[in-house]
Image (cartoon, rainbow, N blue to C red):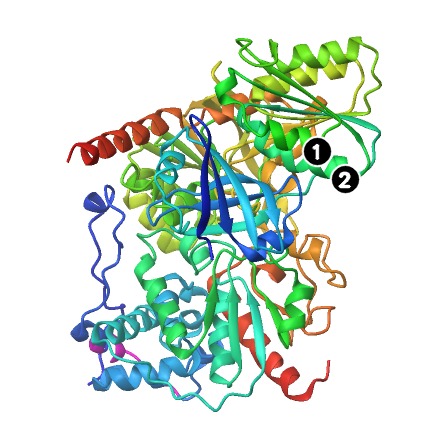
């Protein structure tokens, strides 16, 4: 169990891992995640289950190398094992035939939006997907999103692929064009989800955001991931990760994600120094 | 020869000064000589009330007699008849409320230091090394799934394996031990001690599966397809908050998170270990139980200049063990009694900067028999802090009850059981420990595990529910 069967680069700092985890693969539903720990001294981090294959017993994890743990995982070779994987965790996304749904994935958020998109399409929705990134090099999964959507709109901040601008620009255009939209699901950087939420609230479109809080156990035990939704404290790991975006306090989420920035920087630079030395030596 | 000292033989401990800056265990344990001296205080009274004071019914006078004779191996044997986790119990049981409370000697003098002797026996056995002293009966072929590897689950597993059944423990975290590894700090219960008790169970044949979240990875109903019975011992892992304004500011932890980061994840050794923790200079811990003491003492060791406990009643009503309160005081933890937080104030970046409190006075006794704290209007004041730890209690995690049809819960979220058997409302499913009682002690969970193991054995034999 837990072996990396296939490792692939999706963009400069994003890697895809197909991991042998039969029990989790059998149970995983769109919107759920795992908590992993890669080594004995490692921290526990949550990762969305981007796809699962119950027959093969595999799950797909997509990891952006932003901190020490994700970068160290990046050094793992195919065949190597991830020490601990627990899951599937979290409440699965609400999937039904809503009519027309717009699925918005920004940056690494494209990974978690994919399984929900696939399920929405399978449930009979007309699916319009908007995926965006800073530039073309950071985009991935265009083919898979296209395969499971009726329409895909791509945006990049610098215009190197698709429309130049933000995902919200594309969404605004869709709304302005008079398309009837029954639901929006958005996953990405908190500021992007906040902007999407402000826009859809104005137009009264029900919107779900999947939150990426800091977690430790991922089972409701610690409260590291608490967020405020409609003025109430919720735990992202068990009450979410999906919430009514119009009720989420995104500013609090943004603050709380910043909780360990100095420590992350310290761990990261220590890790860089180590790997640099190794490279030289 | 009997030792007539009116006082317990003192146990050597690390000085308050040195331990403020390390996570090593505080009490150092008896030597053989000290243990014999203390064991010789026991008068071997006829009725042995201490045995009935013990939730797992250890034959206390007999193991103490063995120590007094210098037959430590014999003492181990007596101990392990009833308790497979003596190194843990000797450290964290509230003996002063159980065995030692009813000790005949305690009527006039200090009772026999049963807890310290229990700890000595366990540590002596480990130092000696070697294989389990227990002989196991032939296998019955019956299989039991145990959910949760805390004190209740470990006890059930140990008892069942000694009855000839197979026992498989499913643990959600990556390490077995439950609250013994994530909650109780290293300086009170070294993790190597928990690991060796767990190893002992493994040597007896108990199987432990980590990273398995029952309710998610598999449901209780799915376990019932593979196993003849299921025991639920998932504890009280859902932390309470007070839902005060500003409580979700950065720097405010639940005790569960603060302790899990420090204990299970070893954040006190960051960056050697990867998990970070905010090391506050001024740390407020809210609550008056053992968990609050653990958090406040952890804060001291993480370098807090001031570690302050904020408790709404007075010292008299504090539920923490006296020993823990004393240790905290020695280490410089400050106590603000009759004080309750009403709000937190944060800076523009969202970091907690102040805790706003209100003074309390004690009114009429409440349902718990303790005098109810009442706010003194207009007495609000603020304390500057950079970390706060909310240690006001926990309730059971609802994951299992939500995913198990037919399992009845109470209004408080605990699982309904028949107290004498540990049977739940669902056939083949038993429960015990904090998941039934709400947050309590290690030994009560072990006692509940013992009761459940007996009735599981009966159920496996007869099939009668």
Name the chain under label 1: A
Query: Residue A115 at what x, y percent from top left?
Result: 65, 38
* Magenta range: B36-45
* Front-most of residues B356 and A40: A40
Say what secondary structure mark 1 lies in. loop
Q: Is residue B138 visible?
A: yes
Query: Residue A102 at what x, y percent from top left?
Result: 74, 24
Q: Is residue B44 magenta?
A: yes
Q: CA distance from mark 1 to mark 2?
A: 8 Å
Residue A7 drawn above or below residue B185: above
Residue A137 drawn above or below residue B164: above
Q: Which residue is mark 1?
A: A148
The answer to whether the residues at label 1 and label 2 have Cβ atoms under 8 Å apart is yes
Q: Quadrant of residue A117?
A: top right
> Main SS type for the magenta part?
loop
Q: Is residue B216 visible?
A: no
Q: Quadrant of residue A31?
A: top right
Q: Which residue is mark 2?
A: A122
Name the chain under label 2: A
Query: Residue A7 at what x, y percent from top left?
Result: 44, 41
* Front-most of residues A275 and B112: A275
Say what secondary structure mark 2 lies in. helix
Query: Is B11 situated left or right of B101 in this image?
Result: left
Q: Is residue B387 magenta?
A: no
Determine the residue positioned at 72% across, 39% down. A119
């Amino acid at each position: 169990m837990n072996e990396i069967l296939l490792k692939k680069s999706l963009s400069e700092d994003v890697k895809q891992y197909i991991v042998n985890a039969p029990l989790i693969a059998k149970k995983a539903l769109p919107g759920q995640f795992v908590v992993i720990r890669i080594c004995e001294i490692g921290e526990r981090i949550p990762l969305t289950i981007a796809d699962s294959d119950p027959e093969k017993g595999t799950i797909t994890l997509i990891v952006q190398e932003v901190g020490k743990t994700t970068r160290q995982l990046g050094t793992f070779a195919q065949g190597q094992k991830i020490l601990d994987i627990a899951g599937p965790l979290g409440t699965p996304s609400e999937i039904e035939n809503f009519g027309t749904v717009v699925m918005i994935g920004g940056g690494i958020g494209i990974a978690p939006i994919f399984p929900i998109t696939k399920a929405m399409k399978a449930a009979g929705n007309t699916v319009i997907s908007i995926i965006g990134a800073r530039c073309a090099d950071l985009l991935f999964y265009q083919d898979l999103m296209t395969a499971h959507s009726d329409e895909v709109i791509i945006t990049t901040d610098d215009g190197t692929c698709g429309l130049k601008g933000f995902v919200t620009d594309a969404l605004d255009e869709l709304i302005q064009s008079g398309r009837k939209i029954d639901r929006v699901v958005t996953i990405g950087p908190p500021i992007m989800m906040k902007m999407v939420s402000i826009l859809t609230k104005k137009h009264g479109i029900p919107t779900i955001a999947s939150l990426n809080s800091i977690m430790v156990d991922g089972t409701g035990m610690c409260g590291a991931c608490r967020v405020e939704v409609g003025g109430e404290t919720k735990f992202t790991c068990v009450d979410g990760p999906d919430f009514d975006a119009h009720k989420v306090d995104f500013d609090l989420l943004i603050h709380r994600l910043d909780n360990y920035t100095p420590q992350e920087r310290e761990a990261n630079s220590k890790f860089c120094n180590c790997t640099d030395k190794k490279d030289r030596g | 020869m009997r030792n007539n000292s009116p006082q317990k033989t003192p146990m050597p401990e690390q000085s308050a000064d040195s331990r403020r800056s390390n996570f090593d265990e505080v009490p150092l344990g008896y030597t053989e000589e000290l243990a014999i001296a203390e064991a010789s205080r026991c008068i071997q009274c006829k009725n042995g009330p201490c045995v009935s004071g013990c939730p797992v019914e250890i034959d206390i006078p007999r193991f103490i007699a063995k120590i007094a004779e210098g037959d430590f191996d014999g003492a181990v044997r007596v101990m392990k008849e009833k308790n497979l986790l003596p190194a843990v119990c000797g450290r964290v049981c509230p003996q002063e409320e159980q065995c030692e409370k009813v000790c005949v000697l305690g009527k006039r003098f200090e009772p026999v230091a049963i807890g310290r002797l229990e700890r000595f026996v366990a540590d002596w056995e480990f130092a000696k090394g070697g294989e389990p002293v227990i002989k196991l009966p032939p296998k019955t072929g019956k299989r039991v799934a145990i959910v949760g590897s805390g004190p209740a689950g470990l006890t059930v597993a140990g008892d069942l394996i000694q009855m000839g059944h197979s026992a498989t423990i499913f643990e959600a975290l990556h390490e077995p031990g439950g609250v013994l590894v994530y909650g109780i700090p290293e300086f009170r219960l070294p993790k190597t001690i928990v690991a060796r008790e767990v190893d002992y169970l493994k040597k007896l044949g108990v199987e432990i599966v980590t990273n398995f979240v029952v309710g998610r990875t598999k449901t209780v109903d799915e376990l019932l397809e593979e196993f003849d019975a299921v025991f639920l011992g998932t504890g009280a892992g859902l932390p309470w908050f007070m839902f005060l304004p500003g409580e979700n500011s950065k720097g405010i932890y639940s005790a569960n998170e603060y302790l899990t980061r420090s204990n299970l994840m070893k954040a006190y050794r960051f960056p050697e270990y990867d998990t970070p923790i905010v090391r506050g200079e001024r740390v407020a811990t809210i609550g008056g139980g053992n968990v609050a003491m653990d958090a406040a003492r952890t804060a001291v060791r993480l370098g807090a200049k001031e570690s302050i406990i904020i408790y709404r009643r007075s010292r008299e009503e504090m539920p923490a063990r006296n020993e823990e309160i004393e240790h905290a005081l020695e280490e410089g933890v400050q106590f603000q009694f009759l004080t309750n937080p009403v709000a937190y104030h944060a800076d523009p970046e969202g970091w907690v900067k102040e805790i706003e409190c209100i003074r309390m006075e004690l009114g009429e006794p409440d349902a718990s028999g303790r005098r109810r704290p009442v706010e003194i209007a207009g007495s609000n004041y603020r304390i500057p802090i950079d970390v706060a730890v909310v240690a006001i209690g926990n309730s059971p995690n609802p994951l299992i009850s939500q995913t198990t049809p037919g399992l009845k819960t109470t209004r408080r979220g605990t699982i309904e059981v028949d107290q004498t058997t540990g049977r739940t409302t669902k056939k083949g499913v038993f429960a015990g420990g904090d998941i039934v009682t709400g947050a309590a002690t290690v030994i009560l969970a072990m006692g509940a595990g013992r009761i459940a193991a007996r009735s599981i054995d009966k159920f496996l034999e007869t099939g009668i529910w």
